[in-house]
Amino acid sequence: MPQALYQPFPMPGTARGHVWHHVPETRRPRHFHSEPELNLIAAGHASFGFGDSAIAVVAGDLLWWAPGQDHVLLDASADLDLYVIGVTPELSARALATDIRSAYAGATRLRLDAETFDRLRGVCAMPLVTEDSPATEGRVGDLWRAAHAARTNAPGKHALTRRALVSMLENPELTRRELAAAARGYPTEVSRHFHRDMHLTLSEYRTRLRLVRFIQEMDAGAPNMLTAALAAGFGSYSQCHRKFQQTLGCSPRRFFVPTERRRMEDAFTP
């Protein structure tokens, strides 16, 4: 599994949703974050890596990255026009309401019909009022809802993958056996379908979600790293430390040095 950096989606100010027009000079390395993300290919063609796989896309394609799913732009044509739409988990839940669970069921790539493509591309291209205004947040929420409505009827992930994915996002502390029970399948069966659909193992994905929760607990003022590790679902701080080092390439204490964290979050691919 290629190593991925933890890079939160670049939200301006206090915004809970943003549409970012891709600029080649700000191409990010392989990364993951807690915010769900959509990519709209408006022109050209490209290839993206995710997990242990890669996918080719062309104008009219819509990509979906779940929280914790690593992704990276591997190659792009000179005329690539890409819109990256990200929202906080809270805004996603509010915008999708009862459809929030179905959002995780859809395919990674969806070929949009011409009418839907033109409509979404038009909304993405509209200038922002101010990046973190209520009007902008409402527009991003409407765009998010419309994009997921288009994904609802597309063939997607196996039911076991979908149930395990939703359970982990809600409770990353669950064990493999507990996840299998929540997904209503056998552990080996759930793991097999999850790896096939997400292109990373269930254990790797669960670790990423726990690490994100650990970072969030620390940012929220946890009294110490042990408390944050246990709240995130790790059995001990030593387990958290080991997984943090393996996944992010540095220790938790080094990560929380402000300069080191900014270096990781602001890294670009030359």
Image (spheres, rainbow, N blue to C red):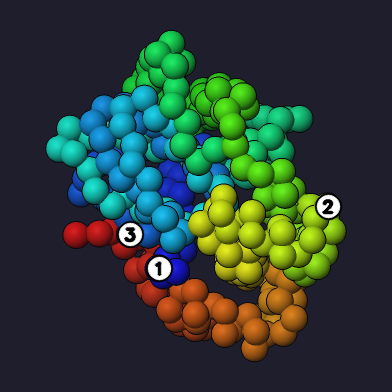
**Residue flagged by tag 3: what amino acid is it?**
Pro
Q: Residue 117 placed where, x, y %?
A: 41, 19
Q: In the displayed structure, does residue 103 sit left or right of residue 49?
A: right
Which residue: 38% across, 21% down?
Answer: 121
Kindly report the distance in space between the C-alpha atoms of the residues bearing marks 2 and 1. Answer: 30 Å
Give, as a three-letter code, the residue at label 1.
Pro
Q: Which mark is residue 137?
A: none
| Quarter of the image with the N terminus in it | bottom left
Residue 14 or residue 269, whichever sits in front: 269
Badge nearest the viewer, 2 or 3? 2
Instruction: Point out residue 239 in the picture as x, y percentages from the top left corner.
Output: 65, 84
Sequence-first disc among 1 and 3: 1
The residue singled out by tag 3 in the image is 29
Query: Can residue 94 be seen in this snapshot?
Result: no
Please name the residue that numbered disc 1 is placed on.
Answer: 2
Q: Residue 7's x, y, as percent?
A: 44, 59
Q: If you read the primary sequence from the N terminus, does the residue marked by circle 2 or circle 3 appear first?
A: 3
Question: Mark 1 touching mark 3, by CB under 8 A?
Answer: no
Category of crowding for the residue at label 3, using alpha-carbon neighbours closer than 10 angstroms: few (below 14), some (14–19), many (at least 20): many
Residue at 43%, 79% (x, y): give it: 249
Q: Name which residue type carries label 2.
A: Arg
Under tag 1, what secondary structure?
Answer: loop
Q: Nearer the viewer, residue 112 or 9?
A: 112
Residue in the picture at 80% in, 67% down: 177
Q: Nearer the viewer, mark 1 or mark 3?
A: 1
Earlier residue among tags 2 and 1: 1
Image x and y of residue 142, in percent: 56, 22
